[in-house]
């Protein structure tokens, strides 16, 4: 099963896109009691494609965005949110090409409360994903936004670590 999308602004012809696809594995232990994205944090260039691949279990990848079941906004305002839907088979893939610079926080719908989240920085950090998790509290129009669960907040790698290492694996 493969799905693809171009997100985050206008994409040019394939020759203008950054080279290389970054792969993020969607993993689980044998019992399904532990779930994670690997790497959990990654730095890419604008126009680069990210591919999520199911290694074990059933997973999704979706941007933190109100269009995704009312979640809070944690991707650049110029970017379009993505949602893979359920990827149920081992080897299933989903791809997005991200063009707007900034921090993109994302989650696995069935495993968000267990801390299955990740962070992508495109180019330079910025936007809502670079702000504190509750930056929107008290702002008009955000009353119905779902906050990032505490277990998920604890998993996100720091922006500094991603910028310093390029890829951050789960601790």
Image (cartoon, rainbow, N blue to C red):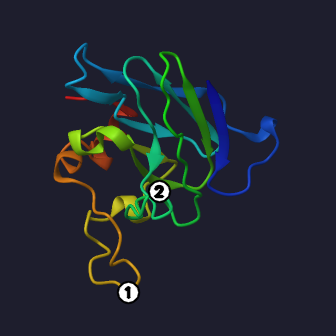
Residue under pointer 1: 140
Q: Residue 103, image x and y in percent?
A: 43, 53
**Few, some or many residues within 10 Å of mark 1 (<14, 14–19, 20+):** few
* Badge 2: residue crowd in 10 Å (few <14, some 14–19, many ≥20): some
Query: At 82% across and 42% down in the image, what residue appears?
Result: 13
Q: Which percent across, then down, holds residue 30?
A: 25, 13
Q: Quadrant of residue 40?
A: top left
Left or right of residue 42, residue 92 in this image: right
Residue 64 seen: yes
Element under label 1?
A: loop
Check the image and report above or below for 9 versus 156: below
Q: Nearer the viewer, residue 149 or 101?
A: 149
Q: Is residue 125 above or below residue 116?
A: below
> As drawn, is 163 to the left or to the right of 96?
left
The residue lying at 55 percent from left, 49 percent from top is 82
Q: Residue shown at 37%/64% (left/top)? A: 72
Name the residue at the top extreme: 30
The answer to whether any part of residue 117 appears in the image is no
- Asked where in the image residue 127 lies, by quadrant, the reply is bottom left
Q: Which residue is mark 2?
A: 68
Query: At numbered mark 2, what does the secondary structure look like: helix, strand or loop?
Result: loop
């Amino acid at each position: 099963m493969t799905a693809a999308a171009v997100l985050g602004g206008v994409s040019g012809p394939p020759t203008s896109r950054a080279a290389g696809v970054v792969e993020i594995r969607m993993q689980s232990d044998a019992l399904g009691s532990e779930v994670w994205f690997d790497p959990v944090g990654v730095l890419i260039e604008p126009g680069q494609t990210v591919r999520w691949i199911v290694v074990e279990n059933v997973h999704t990848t979706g941007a933190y965005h109100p269009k995704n079941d009312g979640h809070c906004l944690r991707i650049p305002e110029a970017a379009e949110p993505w949602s893979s839907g359920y990827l149920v088979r081992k080897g299933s893939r989903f791809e997005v090409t991200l063009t707007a610079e900034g921090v993109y926080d994302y989650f696995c719908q069935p495993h968000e409360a267990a801390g299955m989240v990740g962070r992508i920085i495109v180019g330079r950090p910025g936007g809502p994903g670079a702000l504190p998790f509750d930056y929107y509290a008290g702002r008009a129009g955000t009353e119905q936004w779902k906050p990032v669960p505490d277990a998920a907040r604890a998993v996100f790698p720091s922006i500094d670590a991603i910028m310093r290492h390029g890829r951050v694996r789960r601790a």
